[in-house]
Amino acid sequence: MKTPLGGVNALYPSLTVIAGALVQGKPNFNCIAHVGIMNYGQTHLISLSMAKVHYTNEGILANRSFSVNIPSRTMVAQADYVGLVSGKKTDKSQMFEVFYGKLESAPMISACPVCMECQLERVVDFETHDLFVGKIVETYADPGVLTGNQVDPAKVDPLLFDMGTMSYYGIGPCLAKCWNIGKSLKNQE
Amino acid sequence: MKTPLGGVNALYPSLTVIAGALVQGKPNFNCIAHVGIMNYGQTHLISLSMAKVHYTNEGILANRSFSVNIPSRTMVAQADYVGLVSGKKTDKSQMFEVFYGKLESAPMISACPVCMECQLERVVDFETHDLFVGKIVETYADPGVLTGNQVDPAKVDPLLFDMGTMSYYGIGPCLAKCWNIGKSLKNQE
């Protein structure tokens, strides 16, 4: 028998990213785990859900671009820190060495092993949150986190966020191949 | 120096869920990892991004409801299987023991330690995908995966999906507390 918990969000853990944007001409960063995958295909669209009060929102709306940077486990304190202090009060522009790609207003973090620069495709309006949907213009990865030409999550060693226990978790072992392990049941049909 | 990979989606790993819906009166299930958190607050809104060709989409649109079930590592073959075969060709209604909560058309999977029943709040239209945004009406958890009254991801032992390496990963160890570990840097300001 299951325990009803009320309408709580239990869609965790989710990937922790550091969102970057230029706000009033300066790089600013925020730690976000309320991310999403919107469209997978020729156009890759991903989302950041950010409470409307955040300082970074202003920059994303002004420049119509942002970056999504994936920190490794070694960056846990820095990732958490940029989520603790607001750009309204604290200048976070010197916190990371940044680089730019094709867009001029999506500062990416050199220390993160994977960075995506995104062009704002649309903003979906929710009660207390702006959903920023971005088209991935280019993805950059440290050669050390690639297996072949694919980003390998075991090498990225990302942070997984859980709201319930308010904790970051690491990634565990590879368990099985997708679109493969289930074939054993297909054969029993 | 980072390697540019083109505009690939590297927002992984992401949580693997089994989406449930009634399609033409029968429970149907699909394995989805393109999930998202849309609004966090009094109204909890989460999303499933599903290619328009999927059979389950028809049921979600008809009943304006769906379930989001989180399988444990022990269910990896079953989760993968429901993503391998389409409800258009294979009746998956007997695959799982199901239960219903407040909604009459959101079949939930008893074997999954965490289940959420969702009312369709809106559909956001993308190029090749329907984004189903659901309001979480009620969340159900096995008492064994709770720590206090919170769902504990270490106990859920979920499947994390990666598209690049086409693999499922487990969850790793708890690394740090959120809104906490970063305070060490705050004190250095």
Image: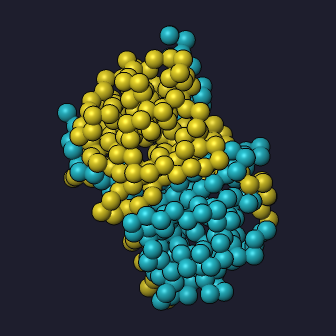
Chain colours: A yellow, B cyan
Pick out the residue farthest to the front. Answer: A62
In the picture shown, does residue B158 fall above or below A57? below
Q: Nearer the viewer, residue B53 or A59?
A: A59
Residue A135 location in percent, x, y? Answer: 35, 51
Seen at 27% across and 39% down, the residue is: A103
Looking at the image, is A38 positioned above or below residue A127?
below
User: For this rendering, which residue is in front, B36 or B129?
Assistant: B129
Location of the N terminus of chain A (image quadrant): bottom right
Left or right position of B144 against A79: right
Query: Is residue B129 visible to us here?
Result: yes
Q: Is residue B105 left or right of residue A102?
A: right
Residue B116 in the image: state x and y as whole percent.
68, 61
Can you tell which quarter of the image residue B107 is in? bottom right
Residue at the far top in the pictured view: B188
Give the image location of residue A50, x and y in percent: 54, 40
Taking depth in this image into account, of B159 and A33 the one nearest to the observer is: A33
The residue under the point 39% across, 46% down is A120
Residue B129 image point, x, y percent: 44, 67
Number of numbered discs overlaid on the protein picture: 0
As displayed, is residue A46 above or below residue B26? above
Could you tell me which residue is drawn at 38 percent across and 62 percent down?
Answer: A40
Residue drawn where x is 51% and y is 38% of the image: A32
Above or below — where is B165 with respect to B76?
above
Can residue B166 be seen here? The reply is no
